[in-house]
Amino acid sequence: MSIQTRTSRSAARAFTLVDVMVSLSVVAILISLMIPGLATARETARRVVCASNARQLGIGVVLWADAHDGRVPPSVFNSTRNYSPSVGGMANSITISRREMSMTRLPTAGDFPVYEEWDGLGLLFADDVLRSPRVFYCPSHGEPHPFERFADQWNGAAGSILANYHYRGEGQNGSTRLAFLEPARAALIADSLRSPDELNHDGGVNLLRADLSASWVSDPDNRLGVAISEALSQSGEDEFGDVWDLLDDLDNGPDEAGDREPSGSAD
């Protein structure tokens, strides 16, 4: 076989520039098709972790109630807990509003906050019912309140702590006793509701109910974000009541939304 023949065959087997460009284009197209699917799968996994966190918080509420006369953890933000901060203390700077019920620890001045400075779901951590601070944070919540922002405070540094879950602190009927929270499917813990920008997920919310069941509740029309915005524009002690009522309605579905009769208060 001559040298010229071998060279001709090698040239025939080699990739041309056009072949390389076509191959790269095909790979680029395949990657572009896969990326949205990978992003969706990643968010679905994060949503599952978020739901697991909500369930752990629910278990924590049960354990805390067992040790405290059957009552769920109280909060200064819905007036289920009496708290009188010292005159001039940092806690005097907080706004007493249901909007703030994602706060687990009130503003502090010392390096090692006393028990009374923990509030709401934060009492689960203060009593060692839930020992991992990560449980209070959704992996989809990048800003403005990720775990990393409060890592030092969870370890004892001064300052308030905001979590990624919102706490109702009582039943729809006003009861603070776990056994008497009614109706059973009323929302008790939800993804952060502090502002529309602080919702953990797009298109819905993870919800823990008074019966301690947890699941994803869809909100494709962003009714929750609109309700939060409207609540923030109002003033008054119960400005967030409509937000929790909407969560109950979203969970019940369109056939039952708005059809609930108000329940009488219970101790």
Image (spheres, rainbow, N blue to C red):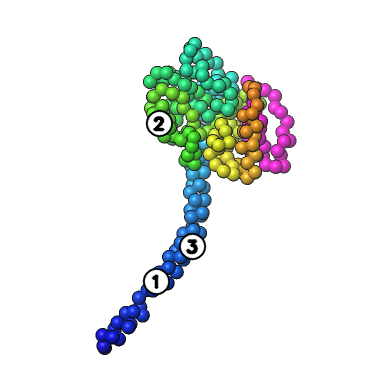
What are the residue bounds of the magenta stretch? 239-267
Q: Position of residue 193 (x, y in %)?
A: 57, 33
Rendering quarter of residue 149: top left
Q: Position of residue 44 (x, y in %)?
A: 51, 47
Q: Residue at x 70, y 42 (%)?
A: 254
Residue under label 2, please give it.
151
The answer for how far apart the CA atoms under marks 2 and 3 are is 41 Å
Q: Earlier in the sequence, mark 2 or mark 3?
A: 3
Viewer-proximal residue among 140 and 124: 140
The answer to whether any part of residue 36 appears in the image is yes
Q: Which mark is residue 99?
A: none
Tell me the kind of residue under disc 2: Ala
Rendering quarter of residue 247: top right
Q: Would residue 30 appear left or right of 233 to someone viewing this image?
A: left
Q: Quadrant of the C terminus?
A: top right
Tell me the kind of residue under disc 1: Leu
Tell me the kind of residue under disc 3: Ile
* Nearer to us: label 1 or label 3: 1
The answer for how far apart the CA atoms under marks 1 and 3 are is 18 Å
Residue under label 3, please give it.
29
Viewer-proximal residue among 79 and 12: 12
Q: Residue at x 65, y 26 (%)?
A: 234
The answer to whether any part of residue 123 appears in the image is no
Q: Residue at x 62, y 33 (%)?
A: 228
Q: Confirm whether the magenta stretch covers residue 10.
A: no
User: Which residue lies most toward the front here?
Assistant: 17
Does dot 2 land on a helix, a strand or a loop? helix
Q: Residues within 10 Å of mark 2 (few under 14, many from 20)?
A: some
Q: Which mark is residue 17?
A: 1
Q: Would residue 142 appear left or right of 7 to someone viewing this image?
A: right
